[in-house]
Amino acid sequence: AQKVTQAQTEISVVEKEDVTLDCVYETRDTTYYLFWYKQPPSGELVFLIRRNSFDEQNEISGRYSWNFQKSTSSFNFTITASQVVDSAVYFCALSEAGGTSYGKLTFGQGTILTVHP
Amino acid sequence: EAQVTQNPRYLITVTGKKLTVTCSQNMNHEYMSWYRQDPGLGLRQIYYSMNVEVTDKGDVPEGYKVSRKEKRNFPLILESPSPNQTSLYFCASKATGTSGYNEQFFGPGTRLTVL
């Protein structure tokens, strides 16, 4: 069965600090997809990134970067120079490619990030 | 605009009073699903549908029903709501295909309180 663990329940930082959100996953499939979503205080889910299991290249998008390491089953998310607007709940999620789990996103528990001015 | 809509957005009800949360998508997606979000548990899948008239249980289906009579609609039915169904509910849809994983689109969420 697939599982996603976000061990950090809450993180509090001061603006301009860098912060890394950890995500560890478990799956038996060789083909799978990893995601990060942001949930701002307004409540909607905002898609941030998708990675497939065959692409271990790290990705950078502005102040956001993602480190995917299959050897440690981790898909960590770093925000550089955090801003107050980054305050949100962040979810890591996993989807397997086929079988009865097709389409299902398995989410981690979420990490509440608070950025103080 | 491509979107998933849910109604109502907020609902307060009482134990045992049947309710339906509607979900509709305008992207002609085959796959639709419902999730509930609870503090400390993340989002968990309730039911999903691969296409019209094809539905199946997710991880937490107890107390819920769904139907998929039309491709665009996937209502969530609570026949006899209980307080433990107080939660934030999300509907999602995605296209199915053979060329990799297609993005899943989420609705804005429905906050349900059962007294």
Image (cartoon, rainbow, N blue to C red):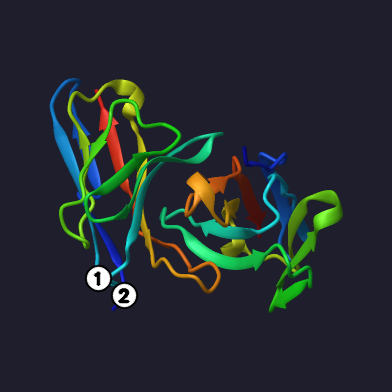
What residue is shown at x 74% (from left), y 74% (from top)? A59
Looking at the picture, tell me which residue is in the foreground, A26 or B10.
Answer: A26
Q: Chain of mark 1?
A: B
How many residues crowd mark 1 within 10 Å: few (<14), some (14–19), many (20+)? some
Vertical position of residue A81 compared to residue A109: above or below: below
What residue is shown at x 34% (from left), y 26% (from top)? B62
Q: Chain of mark 2?
A: B
User: Disc 2 designates what residue?
Assistant: B2
What residue is shown at x 24% (from left), y 22% (from top)? B115
**What kind of element bears circle 1?**
loop
Q: Cα distance, mark 1 to mark 2?
A: 6 Å
Question: Residue B35 appears at what percent x and percent y?
Answer: 40, 44
Image quadrant in which the C terminus of chain A is located? bottom right
What residue is shown at x 57% (from left), y 67% (from top)? A48
Horizontal side of residue B53 vs A97, given as left or right = left
Res. A72 visible in picture:
yes
Q: Are marks 1 and 2 in contact (CB under 8 Å)?
A: yes
Question: Residue A2 appears at what percent x and percent y?
Answer: 62, 41
Kind of residue indicated by mark 2: Ala
Q: Any mark on residue B26, and which?
A: 1
Q: Residue furthest right?
A: A71
Looking at the picture, tell me which residue is in the foreground, B102 or A24.
Answer: B102
